[in-house]
Image: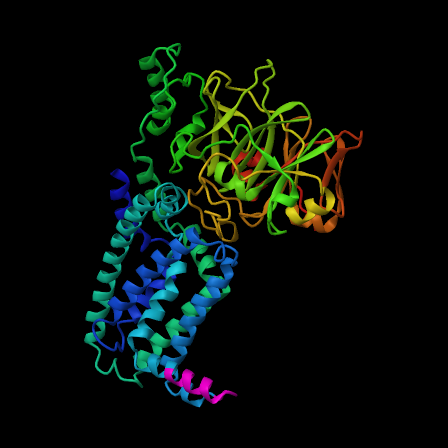
Amino acid sequence: MTLLLVSFIAGILTVLAPCILPLLPVVIGSSVGARSKATPYIVIASLATSILIFTYLLKATTAFIAIPPFVWSYVSGGILVGFGLVLLFPKLWESLKFVSKGSQEANKLMGTGFQKKSVWGDVMVGAALGPVFSTCSPTYFVILATVLPASFWVGTGYLLVYLAGLVMVLVFIALLGQKFTDKLQGAATSGSKFKKVIGGLFVVVGIFIVTGMDKKLETWVLDTGYFDITQFESRLLNQVKIEEPETHNPNSMNPEQNKQFAEELNIPNHLVGLFPDTNWKNADQSLALALPGGPTRDGIPAIDNPEFVSFAQVDYPDEIQAMVLADGNKVKVYPYNILTWHEIVNDTANGTPVTITFCPLCGSAITFKRETTAGTELSFGVSGSLLESNMIMFDRETESLWQQSTGRTLAGELHESTLELFPMQLLTMGEIEKLYPNALIMSENTGHNRDYNQNPYAGYETNDRFVFEPSSLDRTLPLKEIVVAFRVSDNTPVAVPWLALRETKTHTEKIGEKSFNFEVSESGELTITDSNQNEYPFYFEMWFSFATQHGENGKLIKLE
């Protein structure tokens, strides 16, 4: 029930988010020269309906997921630009010439609808804003990516409550705009200068959306110290009560003493509640920044016994990415569309227990060996919590918590341990089929009810917005640019821009006392070796995550 209240508050706060600021003139401007006093409310109702429908379309069909996010920006921005031009030049549609007379008449009718500000014109303006308003709220993202797939009706309830808060504030803004315009004589006339100003505003906002300037404005607002309302919203999510797991280890240390250790380190209550048997005496202070990601412990289910099929049994688009592991004389493939829903796969390769991990919120694709230096074989699960927007894993044997992007323990009996990287490649399914036609593809028969044709995080990687923003941002590279990372012998983390490296094909860089050679084959496979021909395993991650996790200790190799 707490999430219902958070959803309502989130709807209210969304209007104040930096990513919405450039769009408010459209809501206010809909009151100017309105067909009737109901016009702004039709725009707002259409906007809310658009968000609802857009959300369901993302969940119900792969067709909309395949459409790049910039297309929605073109559509939304284009509608607003068109609407603004008609306000600026009322005779515009009448002067247009088309080859087909029928097309000309249809467009005249459409133009007339805009000029007279018909109901359909109002609806189009509101609908154009729906896809842009979406994803501006961490709570909305939690509903979209976790609650709705798990329970359609519960997710719908949360979504409607979120929209109620959003609509309430927008109606208040529209009322203020209407009272303002009522005092302006002649504002509603077709040739009104004020109306032309609003038309110009619509054009500017539309251009901002089409060109991506709205995102740059959002970044500038945040950089100048504007209160980022999404941070407050994330803290609200942190207060959502999560039920403790039913299982309990009777051999754990004194519960009260353990809780005291957690309190001294400011470990969030949601983590302590979910992991009562974790030894909090051994914990990293960075855990004080941990946030609940929406799902509870094992709410995102890891795969422990993956099944595999041949290429003849799957039908994936060539551009789908996958993690590739050598397994003796065989090759195992783990497609992103499955990893996105499960994030962890416990498997074996070359006789070695491995865990294949993927964090969608920071693009980190990493394979670790599951054995500790003491020879203990671990199996990993998803905690449901995040640190600096990165997944926190846990092992089921000791309930130690692990940072996925670094492979180091954050708390528990195995604190101070670091998992060893296992060699992997990141290729597209098209590249894999050409290179390894007999490869074994991880099957969608996982034992869990998920639609693997859908991407719950669609569009996330194409903009600078975060569901859970990290504590610091390094803009040396675009925040979500993928880098390939590895550790040199002195454990220094090194990152190289992946797309630039793929284009360059070969690169040599001196790091410390050694020279390192980077070579990308024509098939897209990467090899990293030092001057002694020692080969280094690597992984992939978004730049913001690498920079946040490693700070000044990390080294970035820029390819000119």
Q: Residue at x 32, y 45 (%)?
A: 155
Seen in the image, is 284 located left or right of residue 357?
left
Q: Residue at x 35, y 61 (%)?
A: 50
| Most foreground residue, 387 or 296 | 296
Residue 99 on the magenta span: yes
How is the model colour-coded?
rainbow
Whole-percent x, y for residue 34 in the image: 26, 76
Magenta: main secondary structure equals: helix
Q: Where is residue 306, by image quadrant?
A: top right
For the image shown, how many numbered marks are present on the structure? 0
Whole-percent x, y for residue 176 in the image: 21, 65
Residue 479 on the magenta span: no
- The boundaries of the magenta stretch are 97-109
Seen in the image, is 175 located left or right of residue 335?
left
Q: Residue at x 75, y 30 (%)?
A: 513
Q: Decide: is 543 above or below 349.
A: below
Residue 497 in view (yes/no): no
Q: Decide: is 200 above or below 391.
A: below
